[in-house]
Amino acid sequence: MRRAVFLDRDGTINIEKEYLCQVKEFEFIPGAPEAIRLLNQAGILVVVVTNQSGVARGYYTEDDVHNLHRHIDRELERSGAHVDAWLYCPHHPAGRGSYALPCNCRKPLPGMLQEASVRHGIDLEKSTMIGDKRADIAAGKAAGCHTILVRTGYGAADEEYVGPETVVCDDLLSAVKSLL
């Protein structure tokens, strides 16, 4: 069983922008590519788990999500870093059509982490979830992972709501350095 670090995307890896789907709007949070490279160098699996309710709401398509992830992969490659797996939840209760269904993948539920565990042989108890929202932390805890809240994105506002078992760091780079 492998150790992994699960990363939220928006507000953790990239600057939070409501319903980000366009490559031209993507911006890394400073230090994020270096943080991912450090995890790669340490032999830790990097898995992004991201809620993408914009699909359910009709703001963008699943192809748009894949396009953006391919762009991020190319940008990370320039920094000598890579993401091992991308998982996303396109569902939302207020969504449209087949996306408006109850699911177990939408954070704060642990479905994406559990799916990654099965697909990639991940030991959840030895793994860590890093994100900028209470939902990220709740998903990590529900999956049995260690948790780190970053103050980027919505993290500064959510800091008061996480318990003492969750480490709080300024950003992804400081979180990864504390982990390693």
Image (cartoon, rainbow, N blue to C red):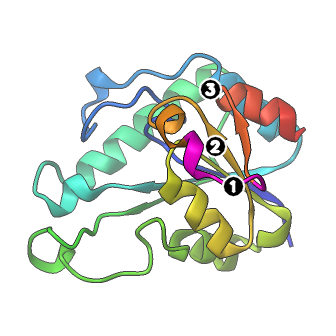
Quarter-wise, where is residue 37 in the image? top right
Q: Is residue 123 visible?
A: no
Q: Amino acid at mark 2?
A: Leu
Q: Amino acid at mark 1?
A: Gly
Q: Which residues are magenta?
A: 159-165
> Label for residue 163?
1
User: Do tag 2 and tag 3 residues touch (Cβ < 8 Å)?
Assistant: no
Give the quarter of the figure containing the C terminus: top right
Of labels 3 and 1, earlier in sequence is 3
Residue beneath the point at 25% across and 46% down: 64
Residue 108, percent from left and from top: 48, 67
Residue 38 lies in magenta, yes or no?
no
Residue beneath the point at 76% across and 74% down: 121
> Label for residue 32?
3
Give the quarter of the figure containing the N terminus: bottom right
Identify whether 118 is placed above or below 131: below
Of labels 1 and 2, earlier in sequence is 2
Q: How far apart are labels 3 and 1 at the CA level?
A: 25 Å
Neighbourhood count class around disc 1 (C-alpha, 10 Å): few under 14, some 14–19, many 20 upward:
few
Residue bearing mark 2: 149
Residue beneath the point at 32% across and 55% down: 52
Residue beneath the point at 30% across and 28% down: 23
Secondary structure under badge 1?
A: loop
Identify whether 153 is placed above or below 79: below
Q: Is residue 154 visible?
A: yes
**Which dot, 2 or 3, sits closer to the camera?**
2
Q: Amino acid at mark 3?
A: Ala
